[in-house]
Amino acid sequence: MITSEPRPGERVKHVRLDEDMLTVDLLDGRTISVPLAWYPRLLHATPAQRKNWKLSGGGFGIHWPDVDEDLSTEGLLRGAPAPPQSMRDVA
């Protein structure tokens, strides 16, 4: 599998979550929106748990410590939902 180095503009600027969507603004001006159904830990989290996020991976990742969820801008840009194991963790 070929992977490329993340570009500086692909760092996270801001994160928003509502009942159905995760929206991530990147430093280069792009906005990524994905359904929360792709990330069951976030889908089932409380609003307070969803709001408690931190940048990780030098700004290329997002970590939710309360629900132990980690996402990368690379995965979000690829449109990658959580792996099946993560989906079973919350069932």
Image (cartoon, rainbow, N blue to C red):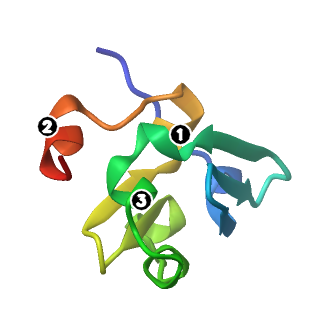
The reply to whether residue 5 is in sight is: no
Q: Quadrant of residue 3?
A: top left
Residue type, label 2: Gln
Graded by Cα atoms within 10 Å as few (under 14), some (14 to 19) or many (20 or more), the crowding at tag 3 reads: many
Q: Which residue is mark 3?
A: 42
Secondary structure under tag 2 reads: helix
Graded by Cα atoms within 10 Å as few (under 14), some (14 to 19) or many (20 or more), the crowding at tag 1 reads: some
Secondary structure under tag 1 reads: helix
Q: Nearer the viewer, residue 83 or 73?
A: 83
Mark number displayed over residue 85: 2
Residue type, label 1: Leu
Q: Residue furthest top?
A: 1
Mark 1 / mark 3, whichever is N-terminal: 3
Mark number displayed over residue 2: none
The reply to whether residue 54 is in sight is: yes
Graded by Cα atoms within 10 Å as few (under 14), some (14 to 19) or many (20 or more), the crowding at tag 2 reads: few
Mark 2 / mark 1, whichever is N-terminal: 1
Secondary structure under tag 3 reads: helix
Tell whether 65 sits left or right of 6: left
Q: Position of residue 68 (x, y in %)?
A: 25, 68
Position of residue 81 relative to residue 48, above or below, is: above
Q: Which residue is mark 1?
A: 76
Say if mark 1 contacts mark 3, CB within 8 Å: no
Which residue lies at the image location 38% right of the left edge and 60% below the top edge? 44
Q: Position of residue 32 (x, y in %)?
A: 70, 43
Cα distance in 3D space between marks 2 and 3: 15 Å
Residue type, label 3: Leu
Mark 2 / mark 3, whichever is N-terminal: 3
